[in-house]
Image (cartoon, coloured by chain):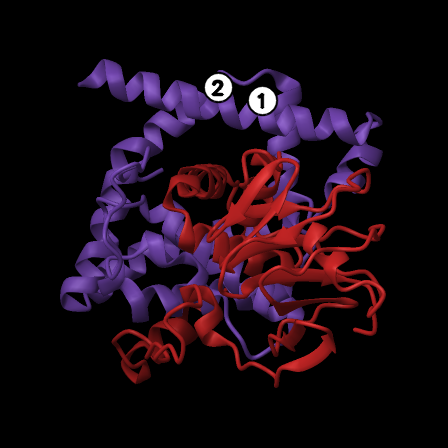
Amino acid sequence: MSLRRQPSEERLLAFAAGTLSFPEAVVVAAHLSLRPATRPWAELGVAVGGVLLDDQAPEAISLDARRDVMARLDAEEFGAEPRPASADPVLPAPLDQFALGPWRWLGPGVHVRDVLGTREGDCRVILLKIASGQSAPRHTHGGVELTCVIDGAYATEDGVFSRGDFEEADPSVTHQPKVVSKEPCLCVAALDGQIMLPGRLGKLLAPFVRL
Amino acid sequence: MSSSRALDDLVVRVGASRDRDAFAGLFDHYAPRIKALLMRGGASASAAEELAQETLLVVWRKAHLFDPARASAAAWIFTIARNLRIDHFRRGSVTLHELDFHLEAEEPAQPDAILSGAQDAQRVRAAMLSLNADQAAAIEMAFFQEQTHTEISRTLGVPLGTVKARIRFGMMKLRACIERDRGDAQ
């Protein structure tokens, strides 16, 4: 899967179905925003959801519930909900709706900031910024961790991961990635648990694992 | 049951002229089905009914954004219900509406889209009939049982890798069927 640099079909179906954890959904949405070629899988999942919705045996709705909704129509405002202006054109559109915490220094050339309002249990979304030329000490993985590259690039034995590329952490992976772009490598990641950092890139942070 | 195209037209009418009769038709078709879908996902009858009401109110508010060339009414309304459910159970203030930008008219159409609206609802339905029983069950469970793949694996009594493979091959088969069907139609 990591060679294709996109989420697996089953993860894209779970995204469409709404069964991913929220932080995972945010990272998948970031990938879909940067990589239109993956969108047909998510659209297919949504289309399947539509067919299943149409095929549901109806559950009776109370007359009061129907009357309430009809009565509320005139009070509803029309028009698109205002979209927040993106403060940063580099960030994928799905991240625009979230406030960002301050950058924190984690180690030489390594900074992290929280994407606020994304936490679900121990899982949340972070942005990672790692300086050019940084390479990684070895590191093992904990729970499911997803990474999408926003800017810059890192390289592993599998090749170069750049803007839009998506990686699911694989516990068996022991590669040592290195940031190969001139500019820092910026990634959005779903981080599960208190200690582990996502993706091979997370290895860059060891032993500074204090998230 | 109303035809897929007729339901799409109802959303278009609501979007174009705030047609209350068209909206009532959508309510009567979709509110009971949204309630059923959410109850299958484990919601209580009262929570499911409330979320069905809220879903239809969002349909009213956002109908002008619906683009029948992009998605069927069913798929579009499914995403609204799905997002409201996620928000409801997270109790958070952030909505996921922005994550579905590609189903609405504000975004440019994708040249590589394999689905392009109402006519494809029939293709998807036909393609789903081509799945074997194991693939169909794994895909359906991913929607309705609020389950992680690990939990599906436990319920079905098969290894996690098998569940993932059934979903993956089922999705690939659906896509291949739809693309072949579109090719034949052209």
* Residue at the image point whose x is 46% and y is 43% from the top: A42
Above or below: residue B36 compared with residue A122: above
Q: Nearer the viewer, mark 2 or mark 1?
A: 1
Across and down, in percent, residue A7 comes to: 57, 42
The residue type indicated by label 1 comes to Phe
Measuring from the top left, give residue A13's x and y in whole percent.
56, 40
Q: Point out which mark residue B129 bears.
A: 2
Task: Please state the horizontal and vertical placement of residue A71, each as a whole percent of the image.
Answer: 35, 78
Q: Can you tell which mark lies on residue B169?
A: 1
Q: Which structural element holds mark 1? A: helix
Callout 2 amino acid? Leu
Which chain has been coloured red in this picture? A
- In which quadrant of the rendered image does the C terminus of chain A lie? bottom right
Label 2 environment density (alpha carbons within 10 Å; few <14, some 14–19, many ≥20): few
Q: Which image quadrant: the N terminus of chain A?
A: top right
Q: Would residue B144 be visible to someone looking at this image? A: yes
